[in-house]
Image (tube, rainbow, N blue to C red):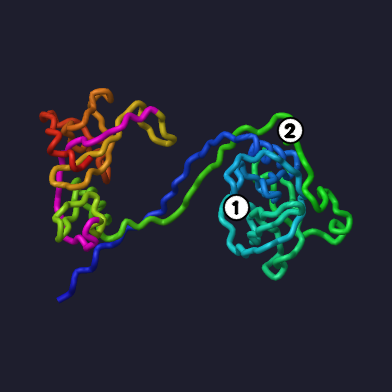
Amino acid sequence: MTSASPPQVLRAPLVVEFPFTRSLGPVQSAFLTGLRERVVLGVRTGDGRVMVPPVEYDPVTAEEIRELVEVAPAGTVTTWAWNGDPRAQQPLATPFAWVLVRLDGADTAILHALDAPGPDAVRTGMRVRIRWAAERTGAITDIACFEPETETERENGDGGAGGAATPHDGAFADPVTGIVAEARLDYTYSPGRAQTAYINALAERRTVGERCPSCHKVYVPPRGACPTCGVATTDRVEVGPAGTVTTYCIVNIKARNLDIEVPYVYAHIALDGADLALHGRIGGIPYDQVRMGLRVEPVWTDGGRYPDHYRPTGEPDADYDAYKELI
């Protein structure tokens, strides 16, 4: 007699990315515009320290600070770590060191990459200098990296602002007033035993949750353990397919790579028999007619592994008391 093999746990690569847009105040605007002009600016705090990169509020007193100063493009490595396998979009494509560098005239260190032939060429206390990017736009990437300072540069003080910070008015032509940072996270996602069973059931157009053996709540999607009681959930329960809209929002901004016309409605839906609401898009009804208590059912597309959206069933709305605990 042979025992059945355990179900395969799903794994898949997942990428989460979005552009993060922010405006800049006068301090950050001056700092990034200065980098474009090959000038490194810091800010002097109330106790006389010079912080690079600059901050807008004193870390000790929390008071707003505006006193800008220029520091040198060369400094000293205070600590470092070797990166032997650079990732995409990191400062250098070849192995390099991450370093904290205290620039001459500054009292704090700035984090960036150091171009070095190997870890044996890096040490705490070594002198380094900024290598500027050939094309600069007013971003931290205007510093291409740091590189070891040569003996001649050390003797001549080439391109530096001296050993002390010097006052700077922060005025530049065409200042940078905002930035767009592309945020991206690449990882391999594994849903685990409970959600693997849930996903496999969806491929069969069934919705399966798990019941807590202690409080008897049914969680959909299942989590593998009850968040209230802290015990494992192994008793599988099929719920739905219909459910009730508990809360919802109207989406008016079109998402990139999502072929859905705005406005549309995204809702929390308590499937019949479940004690946790899941989320899904509502279709088949004008967006301004969606409401709490609306009874809905899943709509599947050919070959789809999960419901494309939920549509009204035509039943009377659910009474508020029937779903108020799931809001």
Q: Write the residue at 72% across / 52% down.
A: 106
Q: Earlier in the sequence, mark 1 or mark 2?
A: 1
For the N terminus, which image quadrant?
bottom left
Q: Quadrant of residue 255?
A: top left
Q: Quadrant of residue 260?
A: top left
Q: Which residue is mark 2?
A: 171
Q: Percent x, y for residue 2?
A: 17, 74
Is 54 displayed left or right of 316 in the figure? right
> Can you see residue 13?
yes
Q: Percent x, y for residue 74?
A: 77, 54
Q: Nearer the viewer, residue 302 or 43?
A: 43
Q: Nearer the viewer, residue 47 or 195?
A: 47
Circle 2 — which element? loop
Q: Which residue is mark 1?
A: 90
Circle 1 — which element? loop
Name the kind of residue labelled 2 in the image: Ala
Stretch of the chain drawn in magenta:
228-252
Q: Write the residue at 74% across / 60% down.
A: 76
Q: Percent x, y for residue 53?
A: 65, 47
Is 67 displayed left or right of 178 in the figure? right
Is 26 displayed left or right of 321 in the figure? right
The stretch drawn in magenta includes residue 155: no
Other-residue count near label 1 (Cα within 10 Å), few / some / many at <14 / 14–19 / ≥20? few
The stretch drawn in magenta includes residue 239: yes
